[in-house]
Amino acid sequence: MPGISPKVITHRLSVNPASSPIKQKKRYLSADRREFVKAEVAMLLSIRHIKEVKYPTWLANVVLAPKPPTFRMCVDYTDLNKACPMDPFPLPNIDQLVDETAGCELMSFLDAFRGYHQISMHEDDAEKTAFMTPEGIFCYLVMAFGLKNSGATYTRMVARIFRAVLGRTMEAYVDDMIVKSKQSTTHADDLRGIFEIMKKYNLRLNPKKCTFGVQGGKFLGYLVSRRGIEVNPEKIQAIINMEPPRNIKEVQRLTGRLAALNRFLSKSAEKSLPFFQIMRKATSFKWTTECQQAFEELKQYLASPPVLSKPQPGETLFLYLGVSTSAVSSVLIREDDGVQKAIFYVSKTLREAELRYSPIEKTVLAIVHTVKKLGHYFQAHPVHILTHQPLGALMRSPTSSPRMIKWAIFLSQYQIDIKPRPSIKGQALADFVTECTARETAVTTTGREPDEAWTLFTDGSSANKACGGGVVLISPEGFRAYYAIRFNFKVSNNEAEYEALLSGLRLAAGLKARHVRIKCDSKLVVSQMEGSYEAKEGRMKQYKEAAAELLKAFDTYEITQIPRAENAEADILSKLSSDTPEHISKIAKVEELSMSSIHASPILSIQHQPEDWITDIATYITSGTLPEDEERAKLAKLRAPSYVIESDKLYKRSYNGTLLRCLHQNEAEVAMEEVHCGVCSSHQGPFSMSRRLVVQGYFWPTMARDCAEVARKCSACQHYQRAPGRPAVNYAPVSTAIPFSRWGIDLVGPLPRAAGNNRYIIVAIDYFTKWVEAEPLARITGARCRKFVYKNILTRFGVPQEIISDNGTQFEAEPFQSLLQEWGIKHRFSSVAYPQANGQVENANRTILEGLKKKLEEEGGSWVDELPNVLWSYRTTPRRATGETPFSLCYGFEAKAPTEVTLPSRRVTQYDPEANEETMKIDLHLIDERREMAYLRAENYRRQIKSYYDAKVRSREFQVGDYVLRRREASKPTEGGKLAVKYEGPYIISAVIKAGTYKLKNPNGSDVPRLWNVHHLVKFYQ
């Protein structure tokens, strides 16, 4: 049998010994197909590629694939392939092969004759390839098409026999082979060398499919030639000739064809975005005007596609970046005689989380994505990234986000340098937008045009080594001014924020700006400027007054707090140390401030202080004079022995012998602010604050009380404080003495999808009898909730007085509300995120879920099928509160249980219809008494719970007009992480609905939707 010698290579299946052999059922063929199979088998037998086999362990069917004008015979090896492990032999990188081929003067394209059939099957595995035909059962002696790992085996064979010439005069990808010559004069010798290798190993070619001595041709889907790399014209025509898609499948076909051309498409992800948006809406298809425009622009672009170049060994490459709101793009280029030529276009559509990245983070993401995709270029060449963004400083900054640090570490292994962007010198790059700009929606102010407004970004930074501010001012035309300000004096974080704001306002005023939008990430500064926070402390008040004075220079202004991620440029500028990177100094002006903008020293001299306890003691020690007030005189005389004066300062002798400097009240305020929220602080509690002040050498008589007051009124401490562990209001049970007059209703889910696509349970409970109604739901809507209440409550138990529910939108929907209004049913909402307000139905939910879990654990099946059984159990089990079963309180007697069928009870064995009827009549007469007793037991049970609950209460009440903070988890339970604020606000109490339930409003007067329980509120101190 001709072909590669088995001593060189054979194909092994390596079937997993644990896999059981599978014999497929026989499939029948039509007459014409049987004749084709018969002829094909005869041909394979004649060339000894197959043999007949008896008693095979594995057996597969023949499959005929259409191959005009006839068929192609294949074998369905699906079952056999599942039992074979994957061969990890690596395939070559297509882009590298194409690059290595482009630029050669002559090429020859080779095709092996039935390439797979030139490799023999291993003798131990041959019979496992058995297949059935109308003529009998046969197996392959050569490697068959359709076998798992056949491509890896062929690639291994090529790599083995052509090892000496691969990468030099030959490139190969599986069975696609090309002989290349950089000089046309050497091509004959190159071919001779390849043919000698083929002759040695007996590898045969198909002359009908081979092409020799051409200047270019198709290779791996590309058109390669001396000019470079071009698009396959057939792929372009396939798109140009396409009609506009009429369904999702045709859109998928279009995006698939575009994916094959990504290397040649500038900003392909952005160009294809309208098509991706259509595919996300799988339930509806609409070919919009935007899609048609994008479709036409693609056709126009492909009408003159670029010719890509090939980089030369060791030369420096350049990377241009493009960033939009929904995609990032890049183009890798090289310079040839002063002309920039594209090598590779890269593009990426941003996912949900990536859409929220800041502009600079998106820029770095574009670099990281490009490096991951084109790593072989970055490993072999130094690359200059051309951009005006200060990426180098950002990635070197130790204060960058963890994501940026991770990216910086990844990129550090390559020869990457950030350079300012020069002018573009190449027609192929003319439509590529290289500047990183964020497309933001303009915010307009009534009475003026939005284009007249300047935008000002400010940020301040305070650290041990350096303090500074960053200012980015954007003109209405889009021109940007970058300022980095260094503070040659110590400031707190809040003071640094104000200094940056004042510097930005002075800059904007100097440029004659009349309308300005200020964007700052400091909540304190923005809130104080808006008036929602009061600036009580001396320096903060001075800063606010200075900013207000500068704002008078503008006709209109807006000040907005933004997330730090959206203020990245100003943040970077604020953190620059004394050594400014060269590429930043070219675009950002660096200034220094030698003194504070409010010209105030943080420590005031003692002679300007008002008279207080220090004055009394110091005067008595120096001159013996006491104050006229008897109480002050008595205190001064009593305290004086513990104090001493040095350099006109009063000091107190401490118990360990050190001297503590005595502070006036305004000096104490400065000291407390620095210790609590200054540079070297972490918002400690009052005890730690007073201890630190003593250790640092300060004292005043009311130190502990003043520290407690500062900590209590600190905005950050209040927003991040721990939630109170004890209940804040006494237990207020909801009860009723009338059956079926008050119902609680709630929803449970989502649960595992069950029959009928059901994923939820709607549950209702009667507050008196504890009778539960429940049904599975596929979707939770107002209409479905209305149907449940009407069918399961109104038509069975009558019209209730009241229904209690949570704040779900389905209970606020018009269908549900119209039913309640139609029947005159009062609707009460429980407080937001406080399920205890509807506790009975929550308790029923828990019991139903526990019952379903245990049922499914024991018996399996669907929870929908088990729900009636769990409800039956609930209704016939005595409840602790009433001492009765819900069934007996509803019907006056106990239900017959399944146990009484298996093990008959006395009432079953001695059943008498006449006596039973009389007994039932008596029970109905006595049901009111039974219900009365149940009500009394329930009230006693509630009193026990109330006594236990109220013992733990730490009362917390609010009055109308009080300022409060609200727990963030109550309104945004899925947002934030470990560092997220625990409380948000402040809000104002607008109404007291009842004890523990309040209505809130914002400081601007707008109402906060729904009612809020005291459990989620704490007092806000100003």
Image (spheres, rainbow, N blue to C red):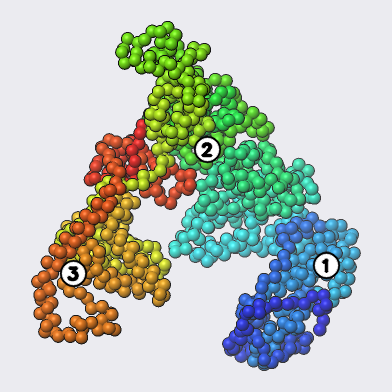
Q: Is residue 1019 left or right of residue 143?
A: left
User: Compared to 882, does 461 lie above or below?
Assistant: above
Q: Residue at x 61, y 27 (%)?
A: 590
Q: Is residue 459 left or right of residue 767?
A: right
Please, what secondary structure does the residue beneath circle 1 have?
Answer: loop
Residue 162 marker: 1
Q: Let me know if residue 624 appears in the view.
A: yes
| First in residue order: circle 2 vs circle 1 | 1
| First in residue order: circle 1 vs circle 3 | 1
Residue 890 marker: 3
Measuring from the top left, give residue 990's x and y in whole percent.
Answer: 27, 39
Q: Is residue 898 left or right of residue 663?
A: left
Q: Which residue is mark 2?
A: 567
Q: Residue at x 66, y 33 (%)?
A: 581
Q: How many angstroms separate mark 3 from mark 2 (CA)?
A: 65 Å
Please name the amino acid that badge 1 sits on. Answer: Phe
Foreground disc of the pair 2, 1: 2
Please, what secondary structure does the residue beneath circle 3 have?
Answer: helix
User: Compared to 679, does 162 lie above or below?
Assistant: below
Q: Are marks 2 and 1 in contact (CB under 8 Å)?
A: no
Tell me the quarter of the picture where residue 750 sits. Answer: bottom left
Q: Viewer-proximal residue, 266 or 669? A: 669
Q: Let me know if residue 756 appears in the view.
A: no
Please name the amino acid that badge 3 sits on. Answer: Cys
Q: Viewer-proximal residue, 275 or 1020? A: 1020
Q: How many angstroms separate mark 1 from mark 3 (CA)?
A: 89 Å
Q: How many angstroms separate mark 2 from mark 1 (CA)?
A: 57 Å
- Dot 3 surroundings within 10 Å: few (below 14), some, or many (20 or more)? some
Tell me the quarter of the picture where residue 786 sits. Answer: bottom left
Q: Residue at x 28, y 79 (%)?
A: 898
Foreground disc of the pair 1, 3: 3
